[in-house]
Amino acid sequence: MGIRSGIDEIILSPGEIEIGSALCYSLLVEENVMEEKEIKELLLKDNEEFRKTFEQHQQFEKRLDKLKAKSFLTNEEELEEKELKKKKLILKDKMYFLMTEYRKSLR
């Protein structure tokens, strides 16, 4: 016994539904990632606020990489690492907010 799809009138077995759902989800995720990358590229090119936020995020990432490469961190470096992670997260949230606002402006 299969389920009739309302769109194409194709009869799918339960196994095919699971595979189809996974494929659809995969395609939606892939499409969203592509859309995210495209929006990010556009905003990097055209939006100064987004570009500055991104650049600062990258600077924090580089500093964190240097700290991670050390075999031992001083108390000051541990504190700096925690602060950088927090600041980086705030910047990431800001970038996603700007991307979401841009996406909304397209509708």
Image (cartoon, rainbow, N blue to C red):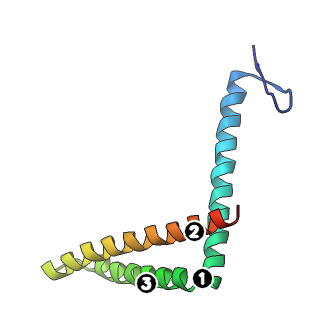
Q: Who comes first in sequence, dot 2 or dot 1? A: 1
Q: Amino acid at mark 2?
A: Met
Query: Residues under labels 1 and 3: Cα distance?
Result: 14 Å
Q: Who comes first in sequence, dot 1 or dot 3? A: 1
Q: Who comes first in sequence, dot 2 or dot 3? A: 3
Q: Where residue 49 appears, x then y in whole percent?
A: 52, 83
* Nearer-the-camera pick, 36 or 106: 106
Give the residue number, with chain letter if any, for mark 2: 99
Q: Amino acid at mark 3?
A: Gln
The quadrant of the image that shows the N terminus is top right
Q: Nearer the viewer, mark 1 or mark 3?
A: 1
Task: Name the quadrant containing residue 78.
Answer: bottom left
Give the residue number, with chain letter if any, for mark 1: 47
Is residue 8 positioned above or below 89 on the image? above
> On the picture, is 10 further left or further right than 57?
right
The residue sitting at the left extreme is: 75
Task: Name the quadrant containing residue 48.
Answer: bottom right
Give the residue number, with chain letter if any, for mark 3: 56
- Proximity of marks 1 and 3: CB atoms separated by less than 8 Å: no
Query: Residues under labels 2 and 3: Cα distance?
Result: 17 Å
> On the picture, is 62 further left or further right than 19?
left
Element marked by disc 3? helix
> On the picture, is 101 further left or further right than 57?
right
Query: Residues under labels 2 and 1: Cα distance?
Result: 10 Å
> On the picture, is 19 further left or further right than 55?
right
